[in-house]
Image (cartoon, coloured by chain):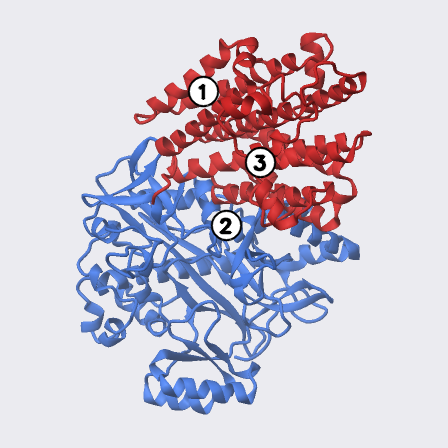
Amino acid sequence: MLSRTADHLFWMARYMERAENTARMLDVNYQTSLLPQSADAAEQGWKGLLSISELSGDFAARYGKVTARSVMEYMVSDPENGSSIRNCLMAARENARAVRGTLTTEVWETQNQTWLEFQRMVANGAFLKDPGTAFEWVKFRSHLSRGVTVGTMLQDEAFHFLRIGSFLERADNTARLLDVKFHAVESEFFGGPHSMGSTAPSAPGEAESSGSSQSQGSPARSGRDVEYDFYHWSAILRSVSGFEVYRKVYRNVIRPEKVAELLILRPDMPRSLAACTQEVLSNLTMIANEHSSETLRRAGRLRADLQYGRIDEILATGLHAYLTQFLERVGTLGVGISRDFLVPVES
Amino acid sequence: MRSSFDEMQISSTQVREHYRGYEQWLAQQPGDVMKSRREEAEMIFRRVGITFAVYGAKDEDGSGTERLIPFDLIPRVIPAHEWVDMEKGLRQRVVALNRFIHDVYHGQDIIRAGIVPGDQIFKNAQFRPEMMGVDVPFGVYSHISGIDIVRAGNADGSGSYYVLEDNLRVPSGVSYMLENRKMMMRLFPELFSQHRVEPVAHYPDMLLETLRAVAPASVNEPTVVVLTPGMYNSAYFEHAFLAQQMGIELVEGQDLFVKDNFVYMRTTQGPKRVDVIYRRVDDDFLDPTAFRPDSTLGCAGLLGAYRAGNVTLSNAIGTGVADDKSIYPYVPKMIEFYLGEKPILNNVPTYLCREKDDLKYVLDHLAELVVKEVHGAGGYGMLVGPASTKAEIAEFRAVLEANPSGYIAQPTLALSTCPTFVESGIAPRHIDLRPFVLSGKTVQMVPGGLTRVALKEGSLVVNSSQGGGTKDTWVLED
């Protein structure tokens, strides 16, 4: 298949997945903001969201004060924000349009319809009137996009590039979500600002998240804090559709290290780092060519690290450091895939 | 020959034989059915993304504009016996045109015979000296030909078909022919059970067969691709559609490269040889080392590979020399010269403004004539005398006098009308027809073609870029 075609497919899937994950994060923040909490805590939630996407600086320059409404507008419909849901859906559709002949009619029409409906929803103010329903809609369009891909596409190279795009993006997004959210809730336990500033490499957006901790290292935690934490842990789980899964797997109260284990190491949890990496590896194996052995080796090694990793070891080195390294490795994989199969960056 | 001819109505009370079934069905439809079907059609076209980009137009957010080509619900019906004659005429005409192009780039018998003046050919910008002496498979240059046909009313109330122009470079519109039929079958399945309409859906198969047949002789299993200028081209939908329907790659210039006079495409598994390119890119942009150096749509070295016979371009380079409006008047003579046959299809009588006498006549009768730029396309650069103001005519006169050889003129034909569903209800609108003729080892075509309709009342311009729409075209068994 044409390298350019593979490139469009890869990015079509990535942008769709990114739109979904952005909607998930916005939704969780929005739902959390409906709970009784201090204005400060609510603001921290929105700030965290911006820092996940490495957009704090751009946002501050253009909008100034962080409010629920301004962040939602920025992340949903702002044409100037390259990561807004609008731009993700548009990019997914433009990439699909460029290779519509390679997609089944159903896949193309799903992408096209999503973009057309999204524009209508923005025009109608659907995301302001009822954000919860609108975010749910984005998630379901993404489910539909993946479902129609799996349900109608021939499982050839095109299919594998779509899958790699989806899972590479998802691995990246889950890791970012974990990083910022854990940071916000349990900064000390998981390598908070005190210990981290000196030992861990700095991550993008760190300035915001390290200032966002509400547990400033007080060892005796009040009942109020525990209750507050419960909602935050469950929010993290819900943002990856993991709350019910957690109960089913652990049959236990929500415990941070278990949440981390579920989202990092469980191979049967579809949004975990282990599951995503496994999908990237198996699809990559199917399309291997004479240049791709190094990329394949890196993917295999990443998968093995997750397969044989243990949560206590990961937490001992510091979750933030671990996730930072994971994101770098995922980034390297993306570059490798582009170089081996897709349109090289230089023309 | 000025008398209005309606494809459906003989008079306000009498319907032509081949429209009777449809007319009865239409009379039974409640008023709002057609309206809701039209809305449904529009919604489906948008979802499917059957759109075209308008040159230069922008949305408010700065992205290019994608528009729908208006689709009219009322089919244009051609009785089978008329189609049989038309098909014979099309076949004859396209065979002669291909013989002509071959002759131009080889022995030039027709010039030596004094039938077409040499400077008409050699001074034509579409003449490609690079093609002199180059042999192409089966001697066929125009594999896909779009022949525009109109019907005009005669004084006795009958109508006659005329060829308005030949399109031998990259004729477009066939995807609308196919999508319009699909849409009609979806909206009105009962019509198709009541009528015996000749199918057209096998066109992509026929096209692929044609393209495979003209591959370089040494290739057994040819790799065929469609070359598009890219997704912002106005006909991108059609390029993607045809590639998908034929199950072949849709490539852009950047996907191709030439090495040792062979053409390859860049794939995820390394370079793959390409044998036939159905190119939807004009000659000028095909190869920056041979033609326009600023072109990014083509592939450097393509002309060399082509001349070496290692790749087939479809259509061939240099076919424009035969579909130019200044060559058009000579086509009937070509048919007699190459085939020894009488032309089956009529040409519209044409005045060549390069000839003194013709020019004088044209200048004296501007208000009655249609004057067209010889190299124009898409309905631009033309004057429709009867529909123009005095000021417009005066302005055009100056343009014409400055460059007479750039123009031809024809009498204003009373293009036939067909009932069309417009805002005010059902009303007659002018139409034309573009059948697509495929030439490879054999010449073949699907019955009918694309019917275009001028949606503005009284307008004769059917081009989609100028507010034209399309209709499904039925060839109906007698």
The residues bearing labels 1 and 3 have C-alpha atoms spaced at a distance of: 25 Å
* Dot 1 alpha-carbon crowd within 10 angstroms: few under 14, some 14 to 19, many 20 or more: many
Q: Secondary structure at mark 1?
A: helix
Decide: is B236 above or below B245: below
Hey, what amino acid is under mark 1? Answer: Leu
Q: Place residue B94 in its image quadrant.
A: bottom left
Decide: is B204 above or below B380: above
Q: Secondary structure at mark 3?
A: loop
Find disc 3 in the rendering and name its residue. A53
Find disc 1 in the rendering and name its residue. A281
Find disc 2 in the rendering and name its residue. B237
The residue located at (73%, 40%) in the rendering is A68
Quick check: can you spot residue A146? yes
Q: Which chain is red?
A: A
Q: Do marks 2 and 3 both belong to one polypeptide chain?
A: no
> Are the residues flagged by discs 1 and 3 in contact, CB closer than 8 Å?
no
In the displayed structure image, the side of residue B94 where residue A35 appears, left or right: right
